[in-house]
Image (cartoon, grey):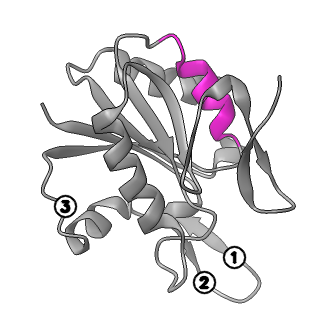
Amino acid sequence: MAIKIITTGGTIDKIYFDQKSTFQVGEPQIVGLLKEANVTVDYEVKSVLRKDSLDMTDEDRQLIYETILTDSHRKFIVTHGTDTMVVTARRLQELTEKVVVLTGAMQPAKLKVSDAVFNIGFAIASVQLLPSGVYIAMNGCLFTPDRVQKNVEYNRFEVCNN
């Protein structure tokens, strides 16, 4: 069965307009990235939000949860902003019969130097191999929502002891 990709916005889809960091969350970039990478696995993309993750609400997280819950697919990738990715992953932990991998980027996919392509490729591989559960795929590492934090100083995700 195909992988369902849910896009929610975040830095991965940001488009910057000037050097003052004025931006908008644009169209989902994942379709173009997957085509450029010649990805041949079956996938479908559904855009449910186009928000910076700092602007996400509990209602937005519920929408993501219900979108996955009611979809017949078993394997999901959620592209998400990194600032509140952990909060959303924790909300999705009730989805015990599905494989859900959240990923994003520290730099927009449209920039020449971005971690977006690597993180998406890592998520595509991970969702095909992991057992049911919710995971975060960032910086070449897999995390569970209850043992991860974003380290803003070092611009990466790390294991934490909650």
Answer yes or no: do the residues labelled 2 and 3 have beta carbons within 8 Å?
Answer: no
The quarter of the rendered structure image containing the N terminus is top left
Q: Does the magenta stretch include residue 90?
A: yes
Q: Does the magenta stretch include residue 39?
A: no
Q: Residue type at mark 2: give it.
A: Phe
The quarter of the rendered structure image containing the C terminus is top right
Dominant secondary structure of the residues highlighted in magenta in the image? helix
Between label 3 and label 1, give the one nearer the viewer.
3
Cα–Cα gap, marks 2 and 3: 30 Å
Using residue 55 as the reference point, say whether residue 101 is left or right of it: left
In this view of the protein, which residue sits in the foreground, 137 or 61? Answer: 137
Q: Quick check: can you spot residue 111?
A: yes
Label 2 crowd (10 A; few <14 / some 14-19 / many >=20)? few
Q: What element carries label 1?
A: loop
Q: Residue at x 24, y 74 (%)?
A: 36
Q: Which residue is drawn at 38% across and 41% down?
A: 126
Residue 55: image x %, image y %? 69, 44
User: Disc number at residue 22?
Assistant: 1
Q: In which quarter of the image is residue 21?
A: bottom right
User: Disc number at residue 17?
Assistant: 2
Q: What element carries label 3?
A: loop
Q: Which residue has dot 3 on it?
A: 39
Tell me: residue 72, above or below residue 28. above
Q: Residue type at mark 1: give it.
A: Thr
Answer yes or no: do the residues labelled 1 and 2 have beta carbons within 8 Å?
Answer: yes
What are the residue bounds of the magenta stretch? 84-94
Using residue 138 as the reference point, say whether residue 128 is left or right of it: left
Cα–Cα gap, marks 3 and 1: 32 Å
Q: Which residue is drawn at 60% across and 50% down?
A: 81
